[in-house]
Amino acid sequence: MDAELFPRERTEVAPGAVHMPGWLDAQAQRELLEACRAWARPPAGLRTVRTPGGGTMTARQVCLGWHWYPYAYARTVVDGDGAPVKPFPGWLGELGRRAVRDTLGADPLGGPEAAYDIALINFYEADARMGMHRDSDEKSDAPVVSLSLGDTCVFRFGNTETRSRPYTDVELRSGDLFVFGGPSRLAYHGVPKVQPGTTPPELGLTGRLNVTLRVSGR
């Protein structure tokens, strides 16, 4: 929105789960978008994820560092073109650590030897959704960092026990940051709705990109 009655402010949605609106400025959003476009090109590019039950995820995905597929990690795109996964850039890891410091107030990774080394980039078109799930395939309990670009979405953040209520719906806009760790690290979460046509015009993107950073512990 160009103008709002009340500015959007940092919100602790649950213990260890923080929403920081507008964390990425316009220039940072453009730079991250250009990087995402490069990562999405083959080999090891944007793909449709197939679930063990034979279904497909409506959001398409590309991975960096480690390739995620339901429900494991590999060094190659084992469920796609078989190419080696694209490398995880150091600058993206630094962005992740800064995101945690800005939201949770500390560097939780135990020193320079521990670092973010996985990125899952999901691309949502207007009708794409993401069901309630937990990020539980890592061997580290470091916080998950989520960055939004493009269309606004409804982000549903739940509890650690069940996919159903209680949960909180949060509006994530382009440039927003959401970090969850500590007691909320294994909370169920999903995207029930994308609001098409809400991308800032200057970004030049149709749809929504979500860049999720994790520490593999591997």
Image: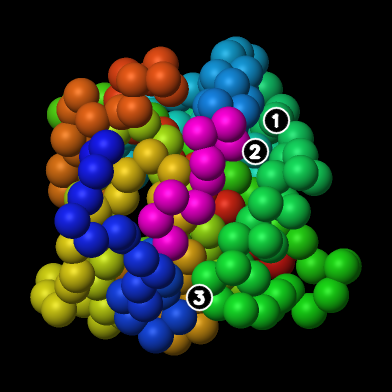
Q: How crowded is mark 1: few (under 14 residues within 10 Å), some or many (20 or more)?
A: many
27 magenta-colored: yes
Q: Position of residue 3 (x, y in %)?
A: 24, 43
165 magenta-colored: no
Q: In this view, does 10 lie to the left or right of 169?
A: right
**Residue wearing tag 3:** 181
Marks 3 and 2 sit apart, C-alpha to C-alpha, by 21 Å
Q: Is mark 2 on a helix, strand or loop?
A: strand
Q: What element carries label 1?
A: loop
Residue 78 can be seen in this image? no
**Residue wearing tag 1:** 86
At x 59% / y 68%, what residue is drawn?
A: 102
Where residue 154 is drawn, which disc sits there?
none
Marks 2 and 1 sit apart, C-alpha to C-alpha, by 5 Å
**Residue wearing tag 2:** 64
Residue 41: quadrant of the picture: top right
**Residue 28 to residue 168: above or below:** above
* Sequence-wise first label, 1 or 3: 1
Q: Position of residue 107 (x, y in %)?
A: 71, 75
Q: Residues within 10 Å of mark 3 (few under 14, many from 20)?
A: many
Marks 1 and 3 sit apart, C-alpha to C-alpha, by 26 Å
Residue 79 can be seen in this image? yes
User: Marks 1 and 2: in contact by CB < 8 Å?
Assistant: yes
Q: Give the range drawn in magenta.
A: 20-29
At x 55% / y 27%, what residue is drawn?
A: 30
